[in-house]
Amino acid sequence: MINFIYICPQYPEWNYRWVEALVKKGVRVLGIGDSPEHELTPYLKSLLTEYYVVYDMNDHGKMIDAVGYYQNKYGKIDYIESNNEWWLNLDAMLREWFNVNTGFHPKDMEHIKAKSAMKESFQKGGAKTMRYLVVSGPQDKDEAIKFVKKVGFPVFVKPNIGVGAASSYSIKNQEDFDRFFSSPLPEPYIMEEEMHGSIVSFDGICDDESNVVFCCTDHFPVPVAELFHRGDDHVYWNVPFSLKMDDINQKEFEKVGRNVVKAFGIRKRFFHIEFFVLNEDRPGLAKKGEFVALECNMRAPGGATPDLINFGSSVSVYDIYADVIVNNRNDENMSYPKYYAIASHRRDSKWYVHSVDEIYQKYGDHMKVSGDYPKNIGAVMGDHYFFATFPTLKEGLEFDAFVREKVGD
């Protein structure tokens, strides 16, 4: 039997679906988390063979004790995974300590966590990359001045190693620039030439030889970081490769995406690889409509997007992931109908014309699910989400316009 340690299976709450899929395929799933056991849902507890509490998961000694306990009780550990960007370094440390070779080790971390180091793998995979500079504070201001003279304002800054939109923002002018360099930074930041356009991600799952066994795209007309700082509601959509995409050369995009997965050496895991699609020419880099690599995430896309993918492709990515863990292939039936899957989001701070009941009355045949995000995720994604599927993108965008129509528009 495969022994799979799942780090933090209780958060976010939909993590249980990964556990559920693994257990259905006969995997023994052992949980380690920082929540007391009584806070786990009864269903998650029923799926886990055992759950071990480590209240401070940054205490590596205690985490080693937890894995050691499981190994002594159940035998050799085959997988240690969190499917969470936050714990990638911890996952890698534990794998090396317990000689688990089904994932990244600490020596691999820089090229998959540091955005500056990702550039090499992107280029190896045939993707264009933005010009950049890594800065740590006032001591790097002179080099940053030279960089800005080369690429011009605005430039975009974010932690070189990190995840999420909260610490990412645009430096639009000299005043912003001087403020940014007025004090030491909490960690190294990457400064990149700012792109104008939308984001399209290459999402999927690959086998042990970095062969993609499932893939699709997510389309973000406005970058999530920008939405976060503006506090806007928003829409994005998932599109299987078998459907038409007007915003990108999908044949070339899939080819580069698959090559990038190989270049990064991603094995038996979900990936979420983001690209900018330019809405204007960028001399010396790319032309309008071309795509430029942004970053590679060794996890599924955020929020409830895995469910959106399922609705678009009429499949379960949770089951595909479990197939890869157990059999190193996709065993699911991929012949079911494909749709444009729309994710429309609302915020509590805004007033909307149509009630939830009205949305379901008008679009009930298309609605798949609606719900509320946890507060920390909702701060970025939006407080409420509405997922629906349509045979055309035009119909999907009409649905979004209805969901997000505001009082006074």
Image (cartoon, rainbow, N blue to C red):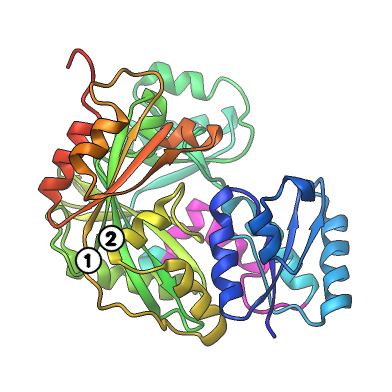
Query: Which is more toward the observer, 155 or 297?
Result: 297
* Residue at 39 percent of width and 64 percent of height: 122
Q: Are marks 1 and 2 in contact (CB under 8 Å)?
A: yes
Residue of label 1: 338
Q: Amino acid at mark 2?
A: Gly
Question: Magenta residues?
Answer: 99-121
Q: Residues within 10 Å of mark 1 (few under 14, many from 20)?
A: many
Q: Main secondary structure of the magenta part?
A: helix
Q: Is residue 118 magenta?
A: yes
> Where 200 falls versus 148 (above or below)?
below
Question: Which image quadrant for residue 406?
Answer: top left
Disc 1 secondary structure class: loop
Q: Can residue 22 be seen? A: yes
- Looking at this view, is 141 or 85 the one in front? 85
Provide residue 356's location: percent of width, then percent of height.
31, 31
- Horizontal placement of 390 versus 267: left or right? left
Residue 10 locus on image (x, y percent): 65, 52
